[in-house]
Amino acid sequence: MEKERILSQYMPVTAAPIIAKWIDYFQCEFKISKGRTTKLGDYRHPYRGAGHKISVNNNLNCYAFLVTTVHEFAHLLTWNDHKNKVKPHGEEWKYNFKRMMVPFLEQNVFPEDVKTAIVRYLNNPTAASCTDLTLSRALKKYDESIDVSRLEELPLHTVFTIKDGRQFKKGEKLRKRYRCTCLDNGHIYLFNPLAEVTIEATGT
């Protein structure tokens, strides 16, 4: 019950009992971590006597937290089935992610737009769930409002600032990423459309 109580603070209440059972069943060390800019969650396979370890960022909204948790448990199950003989996000992982997501879809844990995005992703899992743009956009709608914008929402040539203080000018989109010029050194960088940035001014 204590696991369920803690988990329900970070994910939909109806999902907490299922995740608590998974933690016990797989004898997994489950850690709620401080927000990390490089990843939403992490899975570590058993090593030198230590068991499965999963960590998920504490600053995710409840639906993103749950999707990330299922994502990491799918890695755990894939490791149990295949060890390190398959690709991290290969067909085996996609299959496990899909079947582990089923109970939450059946219980209508997610709002309709997120559920639709998850089902769409599961029908055509061409990328890891955390990098699927449609699913990421749906999940981000439920983030707490903060004073940042997503790069894809900005007009062309907008000047923006990233977390480390560097300024860039938004350029054309090349396939899946935007070509942006760093105003500090003139170098070109490619940005994910969902990159969160602060608007400074509008250029020409």
Image: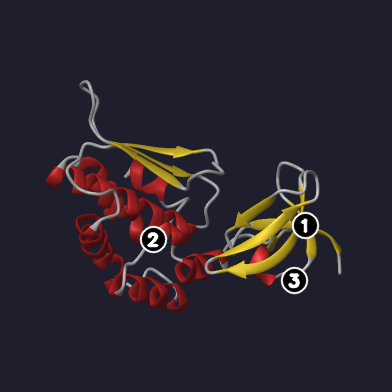
State the residue position of label 2: 129
Instruction: Name the amino acid type tagged 3.
Output: Leu
The numbered mark at residue 130 is: none
Identify whether 173 is placed above or below 41. below
Amino acid of disc 1:
Phe
Circle 1/circle 2 CB separation < 8 Å = no
Residue 160, disc: 1
**Neighbour tally class for label 3: few under 14, some 14-19, many 20 plus, Cα within 10 Å:** some
User: Which residue is drawn at the image coordinates 62% and 69% (left, top)?
Assistant: 173
Q: Where is residue 142 in the image (x, y as percent from the top left)?
A: 56, 66
Q: Which of marks 1 and 2 is nearer the N terminus?
A: 2
Give coordinates of residue 6: x percent, y percent: 42, 44
Identify which residue is drawn at 34% across, 43% down: 3
Q: Disc 3 vs disc 2: which is toward the camera?
A: 3
The x and y percentages for residue 85 are 17, 43
**Image point 80% across, 44% down: which residue?**
184
Label whose residue precedes the other's in the sequence (3 or 2): 2
For marks 1 and 3, give the CA distance: 11 Å
Q: How crowded is mark 1: few (under 14 residues within 10 Å), some or many (20 or more)?
A: many
Per the image, the residue denoted by label 3 is 156
Q: For residue 126, which quarter of the picture? A: bottom left
Res 197 quadrant in image? bottom right
Q: Is mark 2 on a helix, strand or loop?
A: helix
